[in-house]
Image (tube, rainbow, N blue to C red):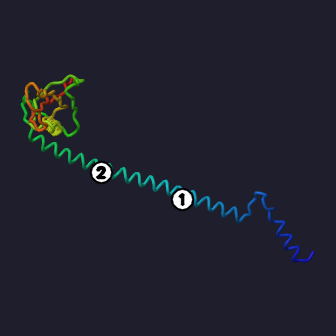
Amino acid sequence: MMPHEAAIAHSHAERPPKGSGEFSPMKTETFKTALVVTVLILLYSVASSADNSNKEFARTEERMREEKRQDEQRAKDYANKVKVARFDSVWRAPRTNDIDVVQAHESVSKAHKNIALLTYECETKAETEAVAGFISKAKDLGADGVLLIRIELPTIEHVNIVSPDARRVFRANAIVYQRKE
């Protein structure tokens, strides 16, 4: 065997036969690098997606806070239109946290005392303004909640035409819960 034939035979002896399933050290390192890069890209994609979700959540949360701030300001404006008839002379600190709102068809779950009658005259379609005004005014009065009072709408027997712009007086009671002493 000539020296160059020995070198070729030696190089062929180190190589696995084709189709044996074994990789050369160079191919193994390339595969490992490609695998690491793929994993890093996947992790970056997941982190980027999570970051985008967090940013979207933060934007939504900020938008909702701004809407709540605007709603509270409008409610204060509506509260200026609420007429109040107090049932007692007790001064209570205004409330800054949420209060209970009890619909006309519901009953109050706790023992309570009515402290004021609240009325709001407006168009029938402005009921949400009335309720927002009641909530804000009840907070100003230091109430624990608002109990909406059912209104009777006119029937065709009493009124020839019922217009959506018809005026109504919405009513509610500001309530405080009875504290056990």
Screen quadrant of the C terminus = top left
Pick whichever, 20 or 51, lies toward us: 20
* Res. 128 image quadrant: top left
Indicate which disc residue 62 carries: 2
Residue 141 picture location, percent across and down: 12, 35
Q: In front: 162, or 43?
A: 162
Residue shown at 22% from the left, 32% from the top: 100
Q: Residues within 10 Å of mark 1 (few under 14, many from 20)?
A: few
Residue type at mark 2? Glu
Q: List the residue tagged with mark 1.
A: 41
Would you place residue 72 above or below residue 146 in this image? below
Whether residue 29 appears in this view of the structure is: yes
Residue 139 vertical position relative to residue 153 in the rendered view, above or below:
below
Residue at 80% across, 65% down: 15
* Left or right: residue 116 compared with residue 42: left
For residue 7, side relative to residue 133 (left or right) = right
Amino acid type, mark 1: Ile
Kindly report the distance in space between the C-alpha atoms of the residues bearing marks 2 and 1.
31 Å
Image coordinates for residue 21, horizontal then vertical, percent: 76, 57
- Label 2 close to label 1 by CB (< 8 Å): no
Query: Tag 1, which secondary structure?
Result: helix
